[in-house]
Amino acid sequence: MSGRDDPPVDGDGKGHPPDDEGVDDWDETVAEWDREVDEWEGDAPEGGDDAHDEPSDETADGGTAPDDDVDPAVDPDPDLSPGDADRVPKVVSAGHINWDVTIHVDSLPEPDGETRIDRLEQSGGGSAANVAVGLVDLGGQSVVYGSVGGDESGALALRELASAGVDPGQVLVDADEPTSVKYVIVDGGGELLMLANDGANESFSAAGLDRDTLAAADHLHLTGQQPETAAALATAAAEAGATRSFDPGRRVADREFDAALHASDVLFLNDREADALAAETDVDPWEPDDRVVAIKLGDEGATVRTPHGSVSHPGFDVDPVDTTGAGDAFAAGFLAAALREPEITGDGFSHDPRDYQVPILVGNACGAVATESVTARTDLSWERVRERMGESPETDLLIEVRA
């Protein structure tokens, strides 16, 4: 793998599986996936299949793999079942908790101009809170850690989290600061701009998180926050034996996140953030040497980069209403799928790109669902995810495996 523009290698050697493999049995694959998810959500689920087969020297078209640093032996018919049904991930999601005011307009006004508000919605927001809610929607257990002000907006944000099934008991209430309120302005094409005050959303510190809560968690997901807080939380999670992910957000290149970045098993970035990180730090998200990086590519889907190769998916066709929170929905879907698989996270996050065929599909499906709803929160039920995933046969996956 030599950069973001290198085509993945698979069945035909040109980045695409053979036309006659993995397509005819797609309906049966999805039907089997549906059956296993139904069992997974029931009281007596059955265990799933292995995440992947061991590599072989045979290519997808029956030939022999070339003797170089790229192994094109990729399963053209990946297992899309949920995996280990008994594993329910427990996640602490730490970072911003906001109250969002979403304003829909036909188009943004010019300077000194005016435009009509077509729709105004208020709801909970903030990346940490959004991911926590998404994980609960997908059957996980979530504790959110962050801070709000001692005002009505803070009370509303906490009440909404509790109603969604998230545990907000660790949230700090800072009576001296207002809750961060984010004004999200969405135009007719679903694109957005944001106006926000910092308020209380970074009043919390690592010392305020109950260590028993962290010790009981399988995973810590970090979003935007003070760099020293992120680094201390990641270190504490590592000591407790929990895996770590980090979605630093737009300010990734402007804040000293180096310690938290290096302490994370998985990074979530969009392509602009990945470019900025590669330019400003010693972390190259496009060619990582010691972690997994999920890079969101907007309407072009996503790519997951590992030290041993990559898996990419072009996403789903959507008519976006509001792209707010789509990246958080992607992270929730990716983690919900990955954390249920001991083969992926049993000993830290796997570096085999084939292990991320299901997580990237689920992540992209959740991101697509999120763009079709107003506000940063949407219902990420498995039913909606299955419906969306059924629109994408496995031949849309482009996989490169490096020896």
Image (spheres, rainbow, N blue to C red):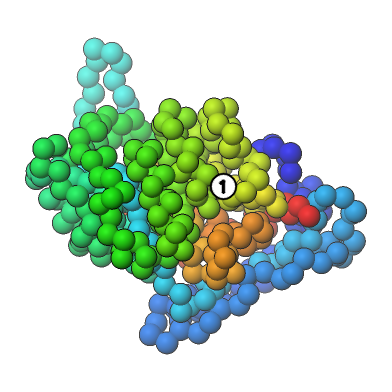
Q: Is residue 328 above or below residue 347?
A: above
Q: Is residue 310 above or below residue 279?
A: below
Tell me residue 73's x, y (percent): 79, 61
Identify the residue shown where x is 10% and y is 42%: 175
Pick whichever, 16 or 139, lies toward us: 139
Q: Is residue 204 above or below residue 333?
A: above
Which quarter of the figure is the C terminus placed in? bottom right
Residue 397: which quarter of the image?
bottom right
Identify the residue shown where x is 46% and y is 52%: 245
Tell me residue 201's x, y (percent): 24, 40
Tell me residue 35's x, y (percent): 50, 79
Tell me residue 92's x, y (percent): 35, 58
Assign a secondary structure to mark 1.
strand
Residue 112: which quarter of the image?
top left
Identify the residue shown where x is 42% and y is 62%: 240
**Crowd around label 1: few <14 · some 14–19 · many ≥20 (10 Å):** many
Q: How many marks?
A: 1
Query: In the orientation shown, which residue stands out farthest toward the bottom?
Result: 44
| Residue 212 visible in image | yes
Which quarter of the figure is the N terminus placed in? top right
Pick whichever, 203 or 351, lies toward us: 203
Q: Determine which residue is flagged by label 1.
A: 293
Q: Is residue 253 above or below residue 81?
A: above
| Residue 103 visible in image | no
11 vs 239, left or right, is right
Identify the residue shown where x is 79% and y is 47%: 14
Disc 1 residue type?
Val
